[in-house]
C-alpha cells in the first residue's frame, strides 16, 4: 500500500485554486473601482514605498513594446497555473488594455527590458527585473512553531532534491556527518545513492535546532518557514532574491552565515549549541522579519503599487 503523507504546514493547492477561480469570475470593473480607494488609504507610506521601489527599480521612463500582451489578452492566453493567478489577481485592478512584460518560472538572469519576474540576481544591475509575489502557494509558507529552541535536537537537518551541482557537492560531503541529518529526495536516476533518504515533513524538521536553507534553481524555498520558526536558519550568502527580499537579510543577524564550501558548518553548529542566547537573538530577528509579509492588506497594496509604477514608467497611465 502506498502511504500518502500530507504536510499540514504547507499551503493547500485545492483551496488556492478554488479561491482564484472565484476571483477570476468576478468582473474586472469591480476591482478597478476599488483601486483609487486603496491608494488613498495607505498607512506607513515611507515603509510601503521603500518596498515598492525595492521591487521595482525602474526609475526611468521606458518604451513599451508593441508585441507585448495586453491584460485582456493575458487573461485569455495564459495557462491557469499558480504564476498566472498570482499575477492576475492584481492585474484585474488595472485597465485591461494596458500591456505587460513578464517571465514565469525560476528566472536567474536580468531581462533586456523591464519585466515582471518571480526571482532575480541580487548583485549587479537588476533594475529590469521587477519582482512580484509569484508562485506564492509554494514559496510563502509561514508556520507556528510550538517547540522551543532549547528542546530541539542538536543537529542540522535538510531534505530536498539535488540536481544542481552545488547541492550535490553539499549532500555528498555531509550526508553521513555526525552533526547532520541531511539527504536528497530525488525522484530521477541515481536514487539508490547512500545520500538518498526519505522525505521529511516540516513538522519533523522543526524538531531540529538548525535547518539548512540552500538555493536550488534560484532561492531556497524553505527559507520563509524556517525564519518564522524557533529553529535557526543556516545559509551561505544568497545569490538570488524574490518578494522575500533575500538581498536585505543580514548575516548572523537574520540567519547564520556559512562559507560557500560549508567548511565552517560543524564549527557553527557547535557554537550555537553552546551559545543559546545568541541563537535566540537571531531567531527573534528572523521571526520579526517574516511578520511584514503576513499582513495581507499591506501586501496587496504594495503589489498594486509595483504594477502601478510599471505602467506609469512605461507611460501607459
Image (cartoon, rainbow, N blue to C red):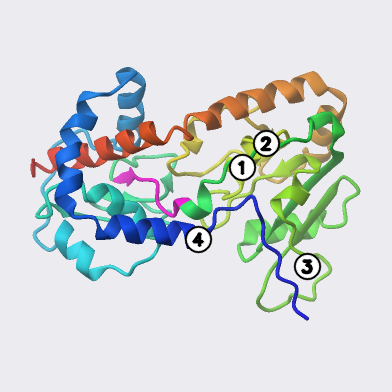
Q: Nearer the viewer, mark 4 or mark 2?
A: 4
Q: Is residue 37 above or below residue 191?
A: above
Q: Residues within 10 Å of mark 3 (few under 14, many from 20)?
A: many
Using the image, tell me which numbered label, if any, was put on residue 196. Answer: 3
Viewer-closest of 109 and 21: 21
> Is 216 one of the magenta-colored residues?
no
Coordinates of residue 308 in the picture (x, y in percent): 20, 38
Instruction: Single out the residue that lies furthest toward the right.
Output: 178
Question: Where does the image place residue 22, in percent across and percent down from the top left?
Answer: 33, 58
Nearer the camera: disc 4 or disc 3:
4
Number of labelled discs? 4
Q: Secondary structure at mark 4?
A: helix
Q: Position of residue 99 (x, y in %)?
A: 14, 54
Q: CA distance from mark 2 to mark 1?
A: 6 Å
The tag earlier along the polypeptide, 3 or 2, is 3
Helix, strand or loop at label 1? It is helix
Write down the region rendered in magenta. Answer: 129-136
Reading the image, the residue beneath label 1 is 225
Q: Are marks 2 and 1 in contact (CB under 8 Å)?
A: yes
Q: Badge 4: how crowded within 10 Å, few (<14), some, or many (20+)?
A: few
Instruction: Confirm or deny contact between disc 4 and disc 1 (CB under 8 A).
Output: no
Find residue 139 and name its label.
Answer: none
Tag 2 residue: 229
Give the number of the mark in front: 3 or 1. 1
**Which of the two labelled residues, at mark 4 and mark 3, occupies the earlier sequence position?**
4
Q: Nearer the viewer, mark 3 or mark 2?
A: 2
Cα separation between marks 4 and 3: 27 Å
Q: Horizontal placement of 304 versus 67: left or right?
A: right
Q: Which residue is mark 4?
A: 13
Amino acid at each position: 500500500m502506498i502511504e500518502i503523507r500530507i504536510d499540514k504546514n504547507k499551503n493547500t493547492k485545492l483551496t488556492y485554486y478554488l479561491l482564484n477561480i472565484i476571483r477570476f469570475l468576478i468582473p474586472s470593473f469591480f476591482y478597478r473601482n476599488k483601486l483609487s480607494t486603496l491608494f488613498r488609504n495607505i498607512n506607513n507610506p515611507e515603509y510601503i514605498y521603500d518596498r515598492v521601489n525595492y521591487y521595482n527599480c525602474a526609475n526611468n521612463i521606458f518604451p513599451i513594446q508593441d508585441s507585448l500582451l495586453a491584460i485582456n489578452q493575458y487573461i485569455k492566453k495564459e495557462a491557469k497555473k499558480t504564476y498566472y493567478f498570482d499575477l492576475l489577481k492584481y492585474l484585474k485592478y488595472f485597465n485591461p488594455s494596458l500591456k505587460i512584460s513578464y517571465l514565469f518560472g525560476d528566472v536567474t538572469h536580468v531581462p533586456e527590458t523591464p519585466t515582471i519576474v518571480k526571482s532575480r540576481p541580487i548583485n549587479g544591475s537588476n533594475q529590469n527585473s521587477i519582482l512580484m509575489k509569484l508562485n506564492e502557494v509554494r514559496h510563502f509558507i509561514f508556520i507556528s512553531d510550538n517547540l522551543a529552541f532549547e528542546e530541539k535536537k542538536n543537529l542540522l537537518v535538510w531534505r530536498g532534491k539535488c540536481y544542481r551541482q552545488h547541492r550535490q557537492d553539499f549532500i555528498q560531503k555531509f550526508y553521513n556527518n555526525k552533526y547532520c541529518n541531511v539527504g536528497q529526495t530525488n525522484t530521477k536516476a541515481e536514487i539508490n545513492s547512500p545520500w538518498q533518504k526519505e522525505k521529511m515533513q516540516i513538522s519533523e524538521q522543526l524538531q531540529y535546532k538548525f535547518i539548512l536553507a540552500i538555493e536550488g534553481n534560484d532561492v531556497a524555498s524553505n527559507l520563509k518557514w524556517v525564519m518564522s520558526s524557533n529553529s535557526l536558519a543556516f545559509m551561505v550568502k544568497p545569490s538570488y532574491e524574490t518578494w522575500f527580499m533575500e538581498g536585505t537579510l543580514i548575516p548572523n543577524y537574520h540567519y547564520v552565515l556559512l562559507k560557500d564550501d560549508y567548511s565552517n558548518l560543524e564549527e557553527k553548529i557547535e557554537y550555537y549549541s553552546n551559545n543559546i542566547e545568541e541563537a535566540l537573538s537571531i531567531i527573534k530577528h528572523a521571526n520579526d522579519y517574516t511578520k511584514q509579509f503576513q499582513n495581507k492588506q499591506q501586501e496587496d497594496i504594495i503589489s498594486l503599487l509595483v504594477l502601478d509604477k510599471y505602467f506609469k514608467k512605461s507611460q501607459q497611465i
